[in-house]
Image (cartoon, rainbow, N blue to C red):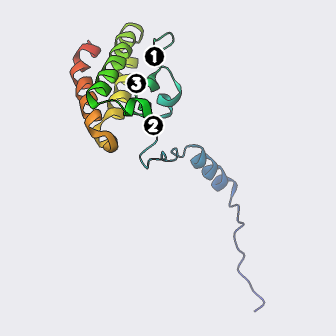
Amino acid sequence: PGTSIPSPSPAGTPSQRARAQKAAENASPAPSPKGGRAAPERCQTMPAAPGLPIPMPAALPGAVDETLAALPLDDQIAHFTKVLGKLLRAEKQSLSAEERKKSFRVLVAAWHPDKNRDNDRLATAVFQYLQEKRPWFHA
């Protein structure tokens, strides 16, 4: 009864605390309210390049608001292909090949139909549009 096993301190060793702090800093963002993955931070905050006519978020699926959602599907598709066309033309002129590649990856990933199950017909049409533009954009 007189001997007790010393318990480790709740904070852990200095190296354990440092690892825990680093892991907390590098933690992935919380899921979006719709239950899907949150868009990459770059998409949410950054225009694709300085001086572009439209910011990157305007070309992502999250830009579908109540007004746009009320339009027929063909009008929604026309809207996004027009917005994406402007963005792709501006980026092709102003970004390096590596930056264009990264930007295109973000757009394709954001519009992939598997990530947009709530609006998969629109996502499929826009995704196909992007796939058609890939060779032109990377040339």
Q: Is residue 24 above or below residue 58?
A: below
Q: Secondary structure at mark 2?
A: loop
- Judge whether residue 65 can be spotted in this image: no
Residue designated by label 3? 59
Residue 76: x and y in percent read 32, 27
Write the residue at 47% across / 19% down: 55
Residue that label 1 marks = 54
> Dividing the image into 4 quarters, which one contains the C terminus?
top left
Name which of mark 3 and mark 1 comes first in the sequence. Answer: 1
Q: Position of residue 46 (x, y in %)?
A: 51, 23
* Residue in the foreground of this view, choosing between 98 and 106: 106
Q: Residues within 10 Å of mark 1 (few under 14, many from 20)?
A: some
Element under disc 1 = loop
Q: CA distance from mark 1 to mark 2?
A: 18 Å
Name the spot of residue 123 as percent of width and height, x first: 29, 34
Give the image quarter of residue 99.
top left
